[in-house]
Image: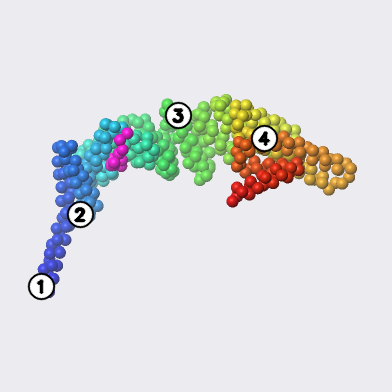
Amino acid sequence: MKNLLIVLSSILLCTGSILAQEPEKDVKKADRLLGIYLLDTKSNADKLKEARDLIDAAYTQEAVSGMYKTWLTRGKVYNEVAGQDNMKLVVNPKAKMENSLAAVTALESFQKAMSLAVKGFEKKDVIEGLNETAQYLNNFGSVLYSSGDVKGAFLNFDGVLKANQLITSNGGKAILQSAEDVNRQKYIAAVCVLSSKQNKEAIVYFEDLAAANYNDSTGAGSVIYESLYSLHSGSDDVKAEKYLTEGRQKYPNETNLLFAEINHFLKKGKLDELIDKLKVAIAREPNNLSIYNTLGNVYDNLCQKEWEKQNNAKAEEYLNESMKYYNQVLEKDPSNSNATYSIGALYYNRAAIVSKEMNLLANDYTKEGSKKYEAKKAEMISYFDKALPYFEKSEKLDPNDVNTLVALKEIYAKKGDFEKSNKCKEKLEAMKK
């Protein structure tokens, strides 16, 4: 028994020795199978699959992971895998790709092969492979972007940039032959990576493009600055404002940056500075009702501030401007719920201010005090009366709007119509459940 165990141990040791040599054999076999496949790609498709399976199992093994041959073979195999999908797309541009990241894998393999290349012909072989890979990367990026896979599109488009850099840094002829070509490819990659919400990567690309002062006929320059503003907003507001200011200076006629600036001022509460910008926006987009509503809202807010300061003359001026823009919306779209509600809210808020003034007179029981109190009450009710039809119309346009129902409940109560007020209250309570 003891001798038998010794024999078995010897067999296991020998077997282990044989297994240790398998990865290198598999790399060679994968390369050989690839050659057979290339002799007749139609008849020998199974040879490519076998080569892929072998190289996938072998390339991470310690015995071969540091070999140039391993990575060159893997790159060449995945070029052919990508080539199969590319051929399908040539025949049918809408064909589904089975290996949409095959070219990315080929690129990664060639990058590793180049890092291990020593001789000139080795680098030349890698460059040859990369030139083929770049074609697939660009084609697959376009297809994936069109299909909505922006993350996959980015990996492929970005791969073209990496392939180009690797080729040129090792003496090869550039795929992207000019700085303009490089920046165009960066812009495409940047748009994809932004869409896939990889913000850190997007910032790198867009900041490179801003530094290069890149622009094209589609208005890429303004998109770059708008994107940099958005990417930095909230995390670095100083930098965000810097890019917004630079963008507006460079591209003063680009509407997307104008709207970004408008939203920025809205967020910061810089209402006075918004008015002229919104008027410019209306001139550029006269049918964009959201701009009219926004300008009406700006005047509305300015009006309320003046009411709070009891500067009624100025408040009335702002109220009329606000009403003007809301009414322009309703002239163009009588069913616009935003403008309808906003006019009601304007009158309602004025009534609320008058209500505060009325309450200050509540404890004055003199004849003169009572007279003033009743006058304020009548004024308050008059504003509620003006607000009411707009809120009633607003409810018809949007029956489940909480703010509208709250306003109606209060107005009906102030006017003594408790039946309608209670109905609004019941509806609000039902919505909470």
Residue 62 occupies quadrant: bottom left
The residue to which callout 2 is attached is 63
Q: Earlier in the sequence, mark 3 or mark 4?
A: 3
373 vs 229, left or right, is right
Q: Earlier in the sequence, mark 2 or mark 3?
A: 2
The residue to which callout 3 is attached is 219
Q: Label 2: how many residues lie within 10 Å, few (<14), some (14-19) or many (20+)?
A: some
Element type at mark 2? loop
Camera-side residue of 345 and 54:
345
Residue in the picture at 82% in, 45% down: 361
Q: Position of residue 98 (x, y in %)?
A: 29, 41
Camera-side residue of 413 and 134:
413
364 vs 285, left or right, is right
Q: Earlier in the sequence, mark 2 or mark 4?
A: 2
Q: Position of residue 111 (x, y in %)?
A: 27, 43
Q: Position of residue 336 (x, y in %)?
A: 60, 32
Against 81, residue 184 (above or below) is above
Would residue 165 be seen by someone viewing this image from the given angle?
no
Q: Label 3: how many residues lie within 10 Å, few (<14), some (14-19) or many (20+)?
A: few
Element type at mark 4? helix
Q: Which of the numbered marks, if any, corresponds to residue 390?
A: 4
**Distance of label 3 from label 1 (alpha carbons):** 83 Å
Q: Nearer the viewer, mark 3 or mark 1?
A: 1
Q: Label 1: how many residues lie within 10 Å, few (<14), some (14-19) or many (20+)?
A: few
Residue in the picture at 52% in, 36% down: 244
Residue in the picture at 18% in, 48% down: 27
Name the residue furthest front. 419
Q: Nearer the viewer, mark 2 or mark 1?
A: 1
**Distance of label 2 from label 4 (alpha carbons):** 80 Å
Element type at mark 1? helix
Residues in magenta, as a range = 94-104
